[in-house]
Image (cartoon, grey):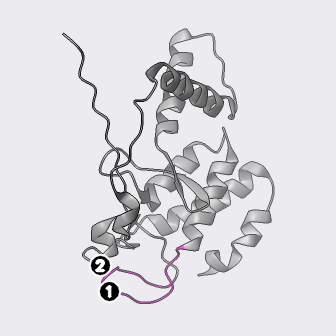
Amino acid sequence: MKPLRASFFVGESPDRNEVGPKTHRSPDLKHLESSVERAARQWIGHYTKVQTDSLLLNNILERSFRDLGILRSRFGERSFFAAGIPWFATLFGRDSLITALQTLAYDPAIAEETLLLLAQYQGEKINEWRDEEPGKILHEFRFGEMARTGEIPHTPYYGTVDATPLFLILIARHAEWTGEMRLFHDLRVNIEA
């Protein structure tokens, strides 16, 4: 019996001509596997290395970083960690801030990217549909058809009480951890808001 292989191309665009079926060859699974493994090793190698006498703890740490790497996403020019797959594979203020807090010891740049991205979408006005208020940090930012057509308020949505204080906590911890105030000064307007 021959194995059945199915490939799916998923695309989204307001221009229908950009997302039609594409002709492509079947992926080389061996090449794909080695590429994914190489990317995972590069991802893990970028961060502070923790080595213990416990093989179990070492394996847990490596697996945790691999799992975290799977949640890495991009939004414009900035990267962030999605809250989870599949439904939460988007930018969540609280979740990305907590992840950044928990990874400060491994790479403070995660916190910097997170803070800069969230500051970019900080609330500026009163908008009841989005629960937006001046100074609030977003709860969730969704993409896709429902977001584009305005069927959901998550473009971004600000209805949370924890993202804004976590934003302030993270910026203070980042300054404390790195010993530098550059990011704090860069985001001073956002902090005061």
Q: Please tell me whether mark 2 sits on a helix, a strand or a loop.
A: loop
Q: Amino acid at mark 1?
A: Glu
Q: Please tell me whether mark 1 sits on a helix, a strand or a loop.
A: loop
Q: Is residue 172 left or right of residue 14?
A: right
| Rendered residue at 35%/45% (across/down) | 9
Position in image of residue 117 (x %, y %): 58, 64
Identify the magenta region: 121-134
Residue at numbered disc 2? 150
Position in image of residue 185 (x %, y %): 76, 71
Q: Around disc 2, counting alpha carbons within 10 Å, would you say few (fewer than 14), some (14 to 19), or many (20 or more)?
A: few
Q: Is residue 114 left or right of residue 98?
A: right
Q: Around disc 1, counting alpha carbons within 10 Å, would you say few (fewer than 14), some (14 to 19), or many (20 or more)?
A: few
- Vertical side of 52 occupied by 134: above or below: below
Residue found at the very far bottom of the displayed protein: 126
Residue at numbered disc 1? 128
Q: Which mark is residue 85?
A: none
- Residue 62, located in which quarter of the rendered image? top right
| Rendered residue at 41%/62% (across/down) | 18
Let me know if residue 125 is in the magenta part. Answer: yes
